[in-house]
Amino acid sequence: MATCKQCGDEVETLVSVKVAGKAKKMCEDCADRLREEGEIAEASESVVQGMMGFKGRR
């Protein structure tokens, strides 16, 4: 059995996910959690840029 690097639980399969440009192997639950956190961070950054009137690319 493989061990998740994020939560330390033993799982049957690990999923490879890119985080900050590096591939990390973790269980599907941790991968889903990181994807959701990334989506929330992008949305909040977009809102802040809109409030500040930022017109650049991202």
Image (tube, rainbow, N blue to C red):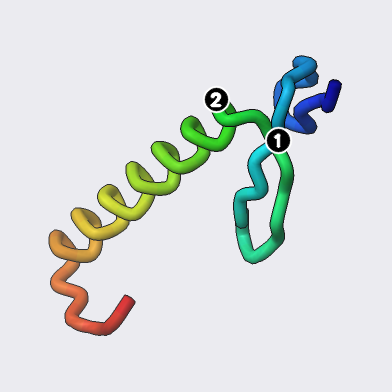
| Quadrant where the image shows the N terminus | top right
Place residue 10 in its image quadrant.
Answer: top right
Query: Residue, x 70% and y 56% (percent of image)?
Result: 23
Residue 41 — which label? Answer: none
8 on left or right of 37: right
| Amino acid type, callout 2 | Asp
| Residue 31 horizontal/vertical position (percent) | 55, 36
Secondary structure found at label 1: loop
Q: Earlier in the sequence, mark 1 or mark 2?
A: 1
Position of 32 relative to 17 (above/below): above
List the residue tagged with mark 1: 14
- Distance of label 1 from label 2 (alpha carbons): 10 Å
Identify whether 1 is placed above or below 31.
Answer: above
CB of mark 1 within 8 Å of CB of mark 2?
no
Residue highlighted by disc 2: 29
Tell me the crowding category of disc 2: few under 14, some 14 to 19, or many 20 or more residues within 10 angstroms, Cα based. few
- Residue lying at the far top of the rendered structure: 9
Res 12 quadrant in image: top right
Q: Residue at x 45, y 42 (%)?
A: 35
Q: Amino acid at mark 1?
A: Leu
**Residue 7 drawn at (x, y percent):** 72, 21
Label 2: element kind: helix
**Quadrant placement of the C terminus:** bottom left
Q: Nearer the viewer, mark 1 or mark 2?
A: 1
Q: Is 45 situated left or right of 8 in this image?
A: left
Residue drawn at x 76%, y 28% as measured from the top left: 4
Q: Residue at x 70, y 30 (%)?
A: 13
Depicted 34 relative to depicted 57: above or below = above
Residue 56: x %, y % from top left: 25, 83
- Density class for disc 1 (Cα within 10 Å; few <14, some 14-19, many ≥20) is some
Residue closer to the observer: 45 or 24: 24
